[in-house]
Amino acid sequence: IAIASEHATECERLRAEHALTEQHQLVGLLLNDFEENASDWLWETNRKGLIEWVSPSLLQHTGADPASEIGLSAGDIYTPRDDHTRASWDRFQQAIAKREPFSEAIAERDTPRGRITVSISGSPVFTGQGQFMGYRGASRNVTRQIDVEKQARLSDLLLRQAIESFEASVMIS
């Protein structure tokens, strides 16, 4: 009976290990698929805010070597914009200070292909005991989107100015 019980326990352990291995493989496949098909690149920081890992897709989207960003902070890479998106950067800084999630912080960065505008989102990572470990997140190039929005705002302003410049007269008979 003891041998049968040990055998059953060993079988359960092997099944659990196999399931865990399959789960890791699935996560790896999903991550690879995401990196190959998405417009984002992924990253991780340590508790000091220094980048520890950047997905290989950074090269595809910016021309920058992911290894060149290891050890840098967001402040080393990104510059907040001086326009209507500045508030998103301020919210990002506040979230980092409080170790809270943040989304769509807009900033600019220089790349081998020129200056681009990016959207940065991330979530804090904590151990099971609640110790802060850093952030994991994603960034994406939103240069075209920001340029289109800027052009739309300018067009709207010009249209409003044109409309306001007309003198309207109404005649009631």
Image (cartoon, rainbow, N blue to C red):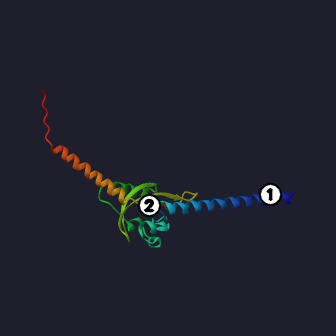
| Distance (Cα) linking label 2 and label 1 | 47 Å
Q: In the image, what residue occupies the spot 57% across and 57% down?
A: 129
Q: Is residue 91 visible?
A: yes
Question: Going from the N terminus, do you reach mark 2 or mark 1 first?
Answer: 1
**The quarter of the displayed image where residue 81 is located:** bottom left
As shown in the figure, which amino acid type bears the numbered disc 1? Ala
Picture mark count: 2
Residue 15 at x, y = what percent? Answer: 73, 59
Left/right of residue 156 with respect to residue 78 in the rendered view:
left
Quadrant in the picture for residue 169: top left
Q: Which residue is mark 1?
A: 8
Residue highlighted by disc 2: 139
Q: Residue furthest top?
A: 173
**Residue 89: x %, y % from top left:** 36, 57
Residue at disc 1, secondary structure: helix
Residue 133 seen in this snapshot: no
Residue found at x 87% / y 56%: 1
The residue under the point 74% across, 61% down is: 14
Looking at the rendered structure, the kind of residue marked 2 is: Ser
Q: Residue at x 49, y 58 (%)?
A: 124
Q: Position of residue 98 (x, y in %)?
A: 44, 56
Q: Nearer the viewer, mark 2 or mark 1?
A: 2
Report the residue that reaches farthest toward the right.
Answer: 1
Front-lying residue, 5 or 43: 43
- Residue 142: x and y, percent? 38, 59
Q: Residues within 10 Å of mark 1 (few under 14, many from 20)?
A: few
Pick whichever, 42 or 168, lies toward us: 168
The quarter of the rendered structure image containing the C terminus is top left
Residue 115 relative to residue 138: left or right? left
